[in-house]
Amino acid sequence: MAKAYWVATYRAVKNPEALTAYVKAAAPAIEAAGGRVLARGMPAKAYELGQLARVVLIEFDSVERASAAYDSAVYQAARKLLGDGIERDIRIIEAAS
């Protein structure tokens, strides 16, 4: 089974306090599904249409585990803490074999 990566790109962070609360609340759901944060923060460089916006990269053992983390009740409760103070894009991609 191929590993999977959860890639979150934050287009706008209008409420940093909401982001802090979300990170604390979301960690248990991500960890319960075996998620490991590989990188997070602002890009060192952005090319072509890339934006200098916060990015988070989380590794999971499979697409199913990554999806389970996102779909879990614990994660969904954490996600609600963001309200309309955060604009982001989350994608789950499977590792190349």
Image (tube, helix red, strand yellow):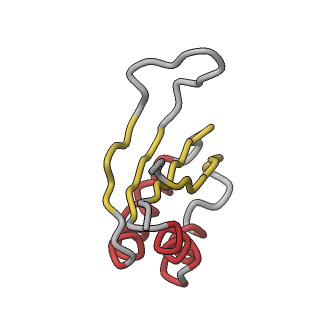
Judge from the rendering whether residue 30 lies leftward or rightward of residue 67; answer left or right.
Answer: left
Above or below, 46 against 43 in this view is above
Instruction: Work out whether residue 50 or residue 95 is closer to the camera in this orientation and state it.
Output: 95
Instruction: Work out whether residue 25 or residue 3 is closer to the camera in this orientation and state it.
Output: 3
**Position of residue 60 measured from the top left corner of the image (x, y, whole percent):** 39, 64
Above or below, 13 against 6 in this view is above
Judge from the rendering whether residue 41 lies leftward or rightward of residue 79; answer left or right.
Answer: left
**Position of residue 33 measured from the top left corner of the image (x, y, whole percent):** 39, 76
Quarter of the figure that contains the N terminus? bottom left
Judge from the rendering whether residue 39 lies leftward or rightward of residue 18; answer left or right.
Answer: left
**Position of residue 69 measured from the top left corner of the image (x, y, whole percent):** 48, 74
**Position of residue 94 measured from the top left corner of the image (x, y, whole percent):** 52, 55
> Which residue is outermost to the bottom?
73
Above or below, 13 against 21 in this view is above
- Count every numbered label the image shows and give the total: 0
Above or below, 88 against 21 in this view is above
Instruction: Work out whether residue 65 or residue 72 is closer to the camera in this orientation and state it.
Output: 65
Q: Residue at x 44, y 18 (%)?
A: 45
> Which residue is outermost to the front?
97
Quarter residue 29 falls in: bottom left
Q: Residue at x 54, y 84 (%)?
A: 73
Instruction: Work out whether residue 84 or residue 45 is closer to the camera in this orientation and state it.
Output: 45
Quarter residue 10 falls in: top right
Q: Residue at x 31, y 60 (%)?
A: 36
Q: Residue at x 62, y 47 (%)?
A: 88
